[in-house]
Image (tube, rainbow, N blue to C red):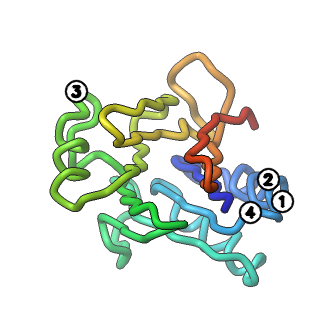
Amino acid sequence: MRIIVFSDTHGFTSAAEDIVKRNLNADLFVFLGDGENDLNSVSRKYYDKSFVAVPGNCDYYSMLPTVGEFTAEGRKIICTHGHRYNVNWSLDSLYRLARERKADIVLFGHTHQRFYRCDNGIYLLNPGSAAIPRDGNPPSFASIDITDKGVEIRHIDL
């Protein structure tokens, strides 16, 4: 199963659309907030694709749940924007969330910085920003491939 993860488009609908167009074979797209209107525009255009989304701190009046949860190929995945978990300062609260909910993978955005780590069987992934990176790298998204052999995660430049 291939999951495409992106975040923080901040009004750059073309970035969201580019990600979907480049990954039409993906099984699922996960959007981690700050650009809900961008996602709405793209998901209407690609109505045959599956999307999971959570709101960011700039998605005012969103009706989306602040934490999403789903299972893919037997792996429990949690997604959140991250601002409610103070991800700018520490990732401890995300690890705690993963342990409380018995999750294998936690996806988060907000920092506009790419991040990937696996500790004690818990994967943490921030795809970076699809529009306004703050880590000196180009805009990006991430792919997660879940197979019988395990989980493979990679960041991809836009």
| Mark-to-mark CA distance, 2 and 3 | 31 Å
Disc number for residue 11? none
Amino acid type, residue under disc 4 in the picture: Ala
- For numbered disc 1, what is the local secondary structure? helix
Amino acid type, residue under disc 3 in the picture: Trp
Image location (x, y in percent) of residue 61: 34, 72
Label 4 sits on residue: 26
| Mark-to-mark CA distance, 4 and 1 | 10 Å
In this picture, residue 5 sits left or right of residue 91: right
User: Within 10 Å of the Cα at label 2, are there few (<14), some (14-19), or many (20+) other Cα atoms?
Assistant: few
Of badges 4 and 2, nearer the viewer stands 4
Among numbered discs 1 and 3, the one appearing first in the sequence: 1
Label 3 sits on residue: 89
Please report the residue visible at 67 percent of the width from the left and 75 percent of the height from the top. Answer: 43
Label 1 sits on residue: 21
- For numbered disc 4, what is the local secondary structure? loop
Quarter of the image that includes the C terminus: top right
Among numbered discs 4 and 2, the one appearing first in the sequence: 2
Image location (x, y in percent) of residue 86: 21, 38
Amino acid type, residue under disc 1 in the picture: Lys
Among numbered discs 2 and 3, the one appearing first in the sequence: 2
Amino acid type, residue under disc 2 in the picture: Asp
